[in-house]
Image (cartoon, coloured by chain):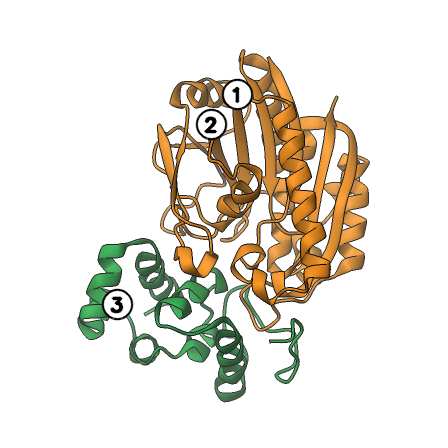
């Protein structure tokens, strides 16, 4: 029910092979180990990088989750931009978007 | 003995992970500067290398977030990231818990820190080690300043941490090298990745090279966030390295390489 709890799930997932295995085996039950609201849970279950970004997840955690679910770097950047277009500006945290949606500063 | 080396370098995961996407004309001179840094460190014959990084939730999280931490382990492992993503293979790195313990005890005379017998290295340490210790021969002591989860320790406390590190290095018989790693301006892992404020970077490095303490400590976090992005908070690591050395600095390399998401930097400072 908070950005902290959502971030904690991703932190556990990033650093624990055992957590990764449980997540891969059954995403739904893994998310129920954490007190998430419906929007947060759905973002994890759907692998909605754009929504997770808009909810304020720190990119240093989010980029590893993206890699875990098979999202390549260029797609990771684009899905965050698409998330801002779809859901509005980043709602919390430090990792706001300051470039335009059609701006690709590193060419990706 | 004493502190025998103090330097700073970039650590972005793209430096290795996205190497094949970079223009070789930009990338290769940067790698060459990293290799020159490796040779310079090796020439000082260090008994241990302290790598002072600003990690990214590999060991420390907001459940219990230390402002300052130092490793005290027998050994460490990394990278915590997928080795195929970072393009750095797993390695076990040897530590020296006895040396760590003596350094930590001396530092505690003036600063508070968290000691850690367990530590898993993320790209903040692994990218520099990939270049600076390719054969995995060095004894390494990791150190960390929280630059990710605010509230962050004020810059003057990063300076005090560096001063304490110097005093502790001078108090042990071993030869200690120090490398602080981080970005100057950068907006990593966001859609802004690749945005670099070269003017801000060059001004910060001008202050760093001159070891101008007052000028380095004058940035507010609001200014840093505005001009240098959330990655700019990692100037804390660079400031600590300057505080440890307090001599004349040299900027060996600086070039913005957007695909690496940072103005790639290699610099060192005389030990005064």
Give residue B222's quadrant in the image.
bottom right
Q: Is residue A104 left or right of residue A85?
A: right
Q: Residue at x 35, y 27 (%)?
A: B74
Q: How far apart are marks 2 and 3 (CA)?
A: 42 Å
Q: Colour of chain B?
A: orange
Dots 1 and 2: beta carbons under 8 Å? Answer: yes
Q: Can you see residue B156?
A: no
Residue at (68, 46) in percent of width and height: B32
Chain identifier, colour green: A
Determine whether the residue tagged by mark 2 lies in a helix, strand or loop: loop
Q: Do the residues labelled 3 and 1 touch (CB within 8 Å)?
A: no
Residue A15 relative to residue B89: left or right:
left
Image x and y of residue B207, in percent: 80, 42
Q: Distance between the residues labelled 1 and 2?
A: 7 Å
**Mark 3 neighbour density, 10 Å: few (under 14) some (14–19) many (20 or more):** some
Few, some or many residues within 10 Å of mark 2 (<14, 14–19, 20+): some
Q: Residue B29 carries which label?
A: none
Residue bearing the label numbered 3: A35
Q: Name the residue under label 1.
A: B47
| Residue B57 as seen in the image, left or right of residue B270 | left
Which residue is tagged 2?
Answer: B139
Quadrant of the image occupied by residue B270: top right
In the picture, the quarter occupied by the N terminus of chain B is: top right
């Amino acid at each position: 029910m908070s950005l902290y709890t959502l971030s904690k799930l991703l932190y556990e997932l990033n650093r624990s092979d055992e957590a990764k295995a449980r997540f891969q085996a059954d995403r739904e039950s893994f998310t129920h180990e954490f007190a998430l609201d419906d929007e947060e849970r759905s973002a994890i279950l759907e692998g909605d990088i754009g929504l997770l970004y808009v909810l304020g997840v720190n990119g240093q955690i989010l980029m590893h989750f993206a890699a875990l679910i098979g999202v390549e770097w260029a797609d990771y950047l684009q899905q965050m931009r698409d998330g801002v277009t779809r859901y509005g500006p980043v709602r919390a945290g430090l990792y706001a978007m300051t470039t335009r949606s059609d701006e690709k500063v590193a060419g990706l | 003995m004493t502190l025998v080396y103090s330097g700073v370098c970039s650590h972005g995961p793209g430096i290795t992970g996205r190497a094949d996407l970079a223009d070789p004309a930009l990338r290769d001179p940067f790698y060459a500067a990293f290799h020159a840094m490796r040779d310079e460190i090796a020439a000082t014959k260090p008994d241990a290398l302290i790598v002072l990084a600003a990690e990214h939730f590999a060991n420390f999280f907001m459940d219990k977030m230390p402002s300052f931490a130092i490793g005290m382990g027998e050994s460490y492992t990394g990278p915590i990231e997928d080795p195929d993503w970072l393009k750095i293979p797993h390695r076990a790195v040897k530590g020296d818990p006895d040396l760590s313990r003596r350094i930590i005890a001396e530092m505690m005379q003036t600063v508070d820190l968290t000691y850690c017998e367990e530590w898993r290295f993320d790209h903040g340490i692994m990218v520099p080690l990939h270049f600076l210790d390719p054969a995995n021969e060095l004894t390494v002591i990791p150190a960390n300043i929280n630059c990710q989860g605010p509230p962050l320790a004020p810059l003057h406390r990063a300076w005090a941490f560096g001063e304490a590190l110097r005093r502790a290095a001078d108090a042990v018989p071993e030869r200690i090298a120090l490398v602080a790693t981080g970005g100057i301006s950068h907006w990593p892992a966001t859609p802004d990745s690749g945005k670099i404020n070269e003017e801000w970077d060059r001004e910060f490095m001008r202050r760093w090279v001159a070891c101008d303490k007052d000028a380095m400590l004058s940035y507010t976090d609001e200014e840093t966030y505005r001009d240098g992005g959330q990655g700019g908070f990692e100037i804390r690591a660079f400031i600590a390295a300057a505080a440890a050395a307090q001599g004349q600095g040299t900027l060996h390399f600086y070039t913005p390489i957007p695909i690496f998401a940072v103005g790639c930097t290699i610099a060192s400072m005389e030990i005064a």
